Image (cartoon, helix red, strand yellow):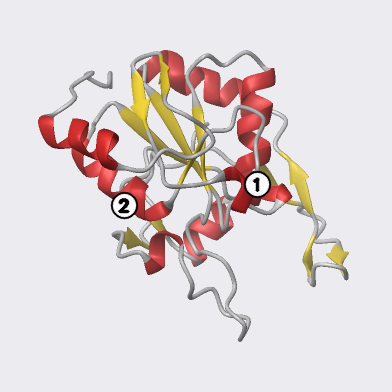
Amino acid sequence: MTFPRILTASALALALVLPLGTAGFADNHGAMIETSVNEADLPKKKTNEPGNYITAAESIALLKERDDVALIDIRSPEETMFVGYATETDANIPFMNVDPAHIYNPKKSSYKMMPNDGFVDQIKGYVAANNPSALLIICRSGGRSAKAVDMLAKAGVETPGYTVVDGFEGDKSDAGTRAVNGWKNAGGEWTYKVTEDLLAK
C-alpha cells in the first residue's frame, strides 16, 4: 500500500502548535513533524544522532491526522504477542530478537537478546514498498528505538526515523512498574491479537 501524502488542516495545526524541541523542524521526504521533546532532557541512551524525537502521546495524535507516516514496532515478536502492540502499527520489524538458546543475562534479569541482521534491509524493503514520509520507531521505552534510528541513518535510509521516546510500555515508576508514560498509558489503542501480516518477513 502506498501512503498518500495528504496533510489535513488539523494535522498542519498540530505540526505548528507543538513546541519545537532541539531536534528542530524536520522537512525531509515530505515529512513535517515537530515535538515537545527537548533532547537535553533525555537520558543518553534515548538520544539519536539525527535528533528526531516524538512522544507516544504526540504519535497517537499525529497518526490520527496523517496517513503518510508509518509506525514501526521494533520489539521482538514475543513482546508484541504477550505484551501487546499499538493497533496503529504498520509493521513489526524487530531490531533485536530473543536468543533461541535463552541464555540468562543476570545484569538485566532477562534472557539475552541478539541483533536482527536483516533489520536495515527489512526497513528498506518496507520503505520501498510503501513510500512513507516518516517512520515513527517504537520499542518498549525508547532505548532500542534510538539505536535503530541511528543505524538507519548511517545505512543511508533517507526517510526520517523518529524515536518514540517513551515507547509502548513507558518508563518505570518509583514502584518499578511501567505506568508513567508510553503508548499504553497515553490512551493509545492497542491489542494482544497478532495479525498474520504484522511481522515483516
Q: Indicate the secondary structure of the residue bearing disc 1.
A: helix
Which element type, helix, strand or loop, lies under badge 2?
Answer: loop
Q: Residue 156 in the image: x percent, y percent?
A: 62, 13
Crowdedness near tag 2: few (<14), some (14–19) or many (≥20) residues, C-alpha within 10 Å: some
What's the residue type where badge 2 is placed? Thr
Task: Look at 64% across and 35% down and name the residue there.
Answer: 148
Q: Tell me: 168 left or right of 60.
A: right
Q: Quadrant of the N terminus?
A: top left
Q: Looking at the image, which residue sits at the far left?
A: 9
| Amino acid on which disc 1 is placed | Arg
Q: Is residue 12 above or below residue 97?
A: above
Counting residues from the start of the chain, the first of labels 1 and 2 encountered is 2
Q: Which numbered disc covers residue 144?
A: 1
Q: Image point 65% across, 46% down: which residue? A: 144
Q: Position of residue 58 (x, y in %)?
A: 35, 48
Give the image location of residue 182, x and y in percent.
45, 61
In the image, 23 versus 68, the foreground residue is 23
Q: Nearer the viewer, mark 1 or mark 2?
A: 1
User: What residue sits right under mark 2 in the picture?
Assistant: 87
Relative side of 197 to 74, left or right? left
Indicate left or right for 185 with 141 as reference: left
The answer to whether residue 71 is above or below residue 24 is below
Q: Residue at x 62, y 24 (%)?
A: 152
Q: CA distance from mark 1 to mark 2?
A: 20 Å
Q: Is residue 73 left or right of residue 27?
A: right
Callout 1: 10 Å neighbours few (<14), some, many (20+)?
Answer: many
